[in-house]
Image (cartoon, grey):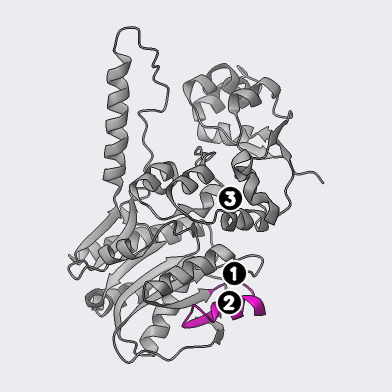
Amino acid sequence: MKILSSRFSGQTPTTPAKYCVFSHFDANDRVERYVLYYLEQLKRCGYEVLLVSTSRAISDASVEALSKVCHTVCLRENVGYDFGSYKAGIELLKQQEAQVSRLLVANDSVFGPFNDLQPILHEMEREDIDLCGLTDSHDHGYHLQSYFISYSTRLYESAAFDDFWSSVDLISNTTDNFKQKIVHNYEVGGSQHFLRTGCSYSVVFPYRDVLDRLFQRTLRKLEASRLPNSDIVMHYGELVYNLNASHAYWDELIDMGMPFIKRELLTKNPTATDVSTWSQKIEESSPYDVSMILEALINQDAIENIYPIDIGQALSVIQTPEDAVDVPLNPALNKWINMASVPAAVPFRFDDQFYLNNYPDVAAVVQAGDYPYGLAHYRRYGFQEGRKCVFKRVVKN
């Protein structure tokens, strides 16, 4: 593995210490404020942080800031995603013969922590737990989600640990379906590898607990709908459950004490989850500085979720896929907006291709000529059925 450069490697502790290998990437070669805050909280919790970045470079200002919170910062070639960076950091620890009392692997794919990490880390660092994740998922197969996983000394020093990390290849982003291969081979495959060894494991916010809360709420709603003169109506999708809780049930997780929200939810939102209340939810549950998230979204040109869409209102304007509706800035963000310049309103269009790709039955009737495009079906049936849709920002040349 090619390490491009390494900076200010701190004195390796001579006694056992907790280490965090932190994977970082930024297309603009920045270290965003939210990342620095995250690293500060890890250091505050007693972790020696090794930041491994696949950015082309890191600015001098960022290096200066990182020197205050990181034991080591190194740049490596941009291949292999987070698992490549985790492997590079672990190899550095092994080469330095660091005495590791607990190893945490984490990355910059989440915003937070919204509250003190110490109680959660204390739970994850229990001596009787070899492997612990914040969340788990059944998507693509059961696994602990790799953005925040803790390993015990016993597991770190085991042959099973060395066997897995030596098997991690740097899958190039030019390889067909490379992301799916990384998830299958290393995120799912890694969890399954360690579970097969019989190691003890735990999850702080397990999927089954999230689902239990959702089931109980749905059952209460079903019971209430049976009462005489009830105006409660069950909608399509209310009894359909997503396997990836960190995306589909982000707000439920925050209510349970989850200290993070996935960055991809606010930048790409691939599951078309309703995240319109993200800033209010964070502010209600913590003193976290939301402007750090807002700043990152603007820097990454991912401002869609700064503009919440009222779908019913949008449909009163949008009649065809070519029509656009002007959506005003989320008023909840007004107090944070002084730190950046964003438009008061942005035009959005219905993403017809997303709707057709996600609903083959709709694609079939459009193909048969029953509807001219997916939007026509959504306006007639999909909206009332609770089907998911996406509105994409209109980018003017």
Q: Can you tell which quarter of the image residue 211 is in?
A: top left
Q: Is tag 1's residue or tag 3's residue first in the polypeptide sequence? A: 1
Q: Which residue is mark 2?
A: 65
- Number of dots carrying numbers: 3
Q: Which residues are magenta?
A: 53-75
Residue matched to label 3: 267
Q: CA distance from mark 1 to mark 3?
A: 17 Å
* Mark 2 and mark 3 residues within 8 Å of each other at the beta carbon: no
Q: Residues within 10 Å of mark 3 (few under 14, many from 20)?
A: some
Front of the two marks 2 and 3: 2
Viewer-side residue, 139 vs 317: 317
Q: Position of residue 31 (x, y in %)?
A: 59, 69
| Looking at the image, residue 272 lies above or below residue 187 | above
**Disc nearer the start of the sequence (2/3):** 2
Is 226 positioned to the left or the right of 75 in the image?
A: left
Q: Is residue 57 magenta?
A: yes
